[in-house]
Amino acid sequence: MQRFIASSIIAMGLSSSAAYAQHVHGGDIELEIEDNAIVTHGARVFEGELSTVTASTSSPGFDSEDGTFAPNTPVTLTLLSGLDAWDSATSTFVSPGSLGSVAEGLQIYNGNVSVLPDAINTAGGGNTLTVNTNGAGSWHEHFTFSLEAPGSATPDIGVYRIELGLSTTQSGVDDSLPFWIVLNYGDSEFNHEAAVDATIAAVPEPATAGLLALGGLMALRRRRASV
């Protein structure tokens, strides 16, 4: 299952989104530069399925159109917080060790470079992966997300979430807003979607946030006009 989560308000831009999607790989997180910052196209919450055999996946990946970035420019994926686990009993995210038999971490790696978050991990040194764009200024990467348990233990069935960000050394381009990937490891579709929905509820989508700001501005103007 590869489903991007977006507010229904984004339906206003479906035609342009469809045209954009023709140039990137389906199922990937699409990157753009808007207002001099990296943005994840249309959403900030994404989901994926971890293999029940290997507890890993390379989806979703990341992709952008040619010319999005300068050629051969470093783009960095940063882990912004520790791994969360979905507690279906309370409909909240908690630290992995408080639910099952082990405290899982999620390894994100590309070749021999890796970062290893655990239940108490926070943003800091060593929590980054940097890969250059290609000669056409596109960034198409599939990192491997691997759920890990201490020692020889087996990860607990469940839904897990990580918070990430993107940055580049390209002049004049700011970091992305935080975004989230919600990964299902052998749990029910119901629990996976509940975890996704809870994340969306806590994180305004780009278009939604923009319309909320516009609504506030219009309300302010109406109040001023009535004075």
Image (tube, rainbow, N blue to C red):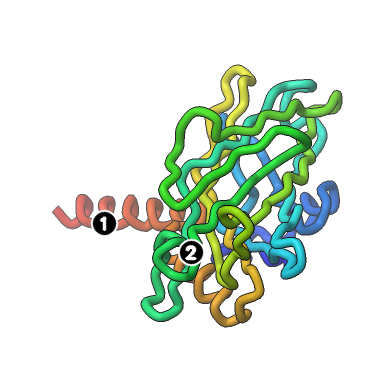
The structure residue drawn at horizontal position 74% and vertical position 49%, both measured from the top left corner, is 61
Out of 225 and 188, give the one closest to the viewer.
188
- Residue 105 as seen in the image, left or right of residue 216: right
Out of 207 and 169, give the one closest to the viewer.
169
Q: Is residue 86 above or below residue 220?
A: below
Dot 2: within a 10 Å radius of its alpha carbon, few (fewer than 14), some, or many (20 or more) residues? Answer: many
- Residue 14 as seen in the image, left or right of residue 38: right
Residue 85 seen in the current view: yes
Dot 1: within a 10 Å radius of its alpha carbon, few (fewer than 14), some, or many (20 or more) residues? Answer: few
The structure residue drawn at horizontal position 38% and vertical position 51%, both measured from the top left corner, is 213
Q: Quadrant of residue 216?
A: bottom left
The structure residue drawn at horizontal position 67% and vertical position 40%, both measured from the top left corner, is 32
User: Mark 2 or mark 1: which comes first in sequence?
Assistant: 2
Q: Type of residue at label 2?
A: Ala
The structure residue drawn at horizontal position 61% and vertical position 81%, both measured from the top left corner, is 188
Disc 1 element: helix
Disc 2 element: strand
Q: Quadrant of residue 46?
A: bottom right
Q: Disc 2 designates what residue?
A: 85
Q: Type of residue at label 1?
A: Arg
Q: Disc 1 designates what residue?
A: 222
Residue 1 location, x and y as percent?
Answer: 73, 70
Residue 143 location, x and y as percent?
Answer: 73, 45
